[in-house]
Amino acid sequence: MANHVSERSTRFTESVIREMTRLCQRHGGVNLAQGFPDFPAPAPLKEAAIRAIEADINQYAITWGAKPFRDALVAKTARFTGQAYDPETEVTVCCGSTECMVATLLALVNPGEEVIVFEPFYENYGPDAILCGATPRFVRLREPDWSFDPAELAAAFGNRTKAIVINTPNNPTGKVFTREELLQIAALCAKWNVVAVTDEIYEHILYDGAQHVTLAGLEGMRERTVTISGVSKTYGVTGWRIGYCLGPTDITGAIRKVHDFLTVGAPAPLQEAAAVALSLPDSYYMELAEGYARRRDMLVPALEAAGFKTFAPRGAYYVMTDISSFGFESDVTFARHLVEEGGVAAVPGSSFYADPASGRQRLRFHFARRRETLEKAAERLSRLKARVPAGRTEGN
Ligand SMILES: Cc1ncc(COP(=O)(O)O)c(C=O)c1O
């Protein structure tokens, strides 16, 4: 039988995260795997979306983004980061930050060039690199605070480095990169003439006084940074598929071309509604972070009580855990056990590492869930240890 599929499509697997969601549905589990909220989106957004459809904003938007959305975006960006962007030449609106990342890497990287990625990493970055023919170079974030070794980072840069991907606040670790760390990255980008691509999708979800620093705001970085974010996480509308790239004109021109031929444009009526979201008052963002802090403070103690060791997140809405006390050799086996027997879905840690062995004793949970859902999860988790025979190892 002829092999019909491309070599590049065989070099990555289906998303483990989304597979866990399907498994969870099959077992009626509480889904703490794929990170999306189960609570309602803000009413003003929904009303604006309905108004937009009723006003017949139902045809293609301008490829690089509807004008009201781009205008609202540059205003919101200036308000929060002090960075000025030209909505006509420096903004591209895509179908989620997922498309932003792949369009940006396709626009920047030639086959054979290298892209630096911190690991553990959000699983999309691996396939994104493969799709554009890049060779990923991984730099380890080390527990318990997920800091990196400056020497290891410096050694990852070289003549073939084209870009570095930085996700802050970080999925899956909850790390928030400090200004000092970002200054080190900025210095290396300048030294090696490398473009920084930042995924700042969790920019407003911060805990315990952690501050989000946008890399583009550091000296010399405005012209060599593509800042990616979107409305999915900040406004709880992951299904709307609206993300955006902010970057200098030359890079934006290339991103726009790639985006045009990938998807033409993001959903037109939802861009109108998302423009309303970008104008929400400061109190919205404060309540967003406080709400997630409360959810974190429900899930983390429940996990600890159930026997997980946790690495407390400083941002985003995930918690990485150490599962070694359960006696399973494999995170994947344990994740299956947890959903099938315990009724809670989480993501095997190995899916965040280039070498799966590094994540064998790790499991990631998210807490973008209503209080009742987290209580249900906590109750199920509390029964977990009793279900796992003491000293169990795989094959027993
Ligand atoms: C770090 C990170 N980037 C991007 C995304 C996807 O964002 P979007 O819905 O805008 O495509 C996620 C979703 O979980 C994420 O965790």
Image (cartoon, rainbow, N blue to C red):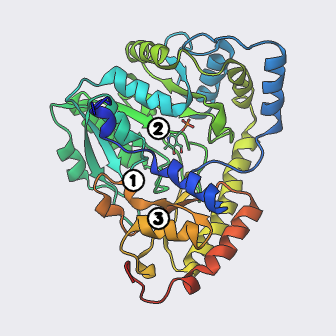
Q: Secondary structure at mark 1?
A: helix
**Place of residue 242 in the rendered image (x, y in percent of width and height, measured from the top left):** 60, 28
**Place of residue 181 in the rendered image (x, y in percent of width and height, measured from the top left):** 36, 48
What's under tag 3, amino acid-wise?
Leu
Q: Quadrant of the C terminus?
A: bottom left
Alpha carbons under labels 1 and 2: distance apart: 16 Å
Q: Earlier in the sequence, mark 1 or mark 2?
A: 2
Q: Nearer the viewer, mark 3 or mark 2?
A: 3
Instruction: State whether label 2 is within 8 Å of ligand 1.
Output: yes
| Most foreground residue, 332 or 247 | 332
Q: In the rendered view, tell whether residue 168 sits above or below residue 68.
A: below
Q: Which residue is mark 3?
A: 363
| Most foreground residue, 93 or 30 | 30
Q: Residue furthest bottom?
A: 390
**Residue 393 visible in this rendered orientation of the protein:** yes
Q: Residue furthest left?
A: 159
Q: Is residue 190 left or right of residue 44?
A: left
Alpha carbons under labels 1 and 3: distance apart: 10 Å
Alpha carbons under labels 3 and 2: distance apart: 22 Å
What's under tag 1, amino acid-wise?
Phe
Q: Which residue is mark 1?
A: 352
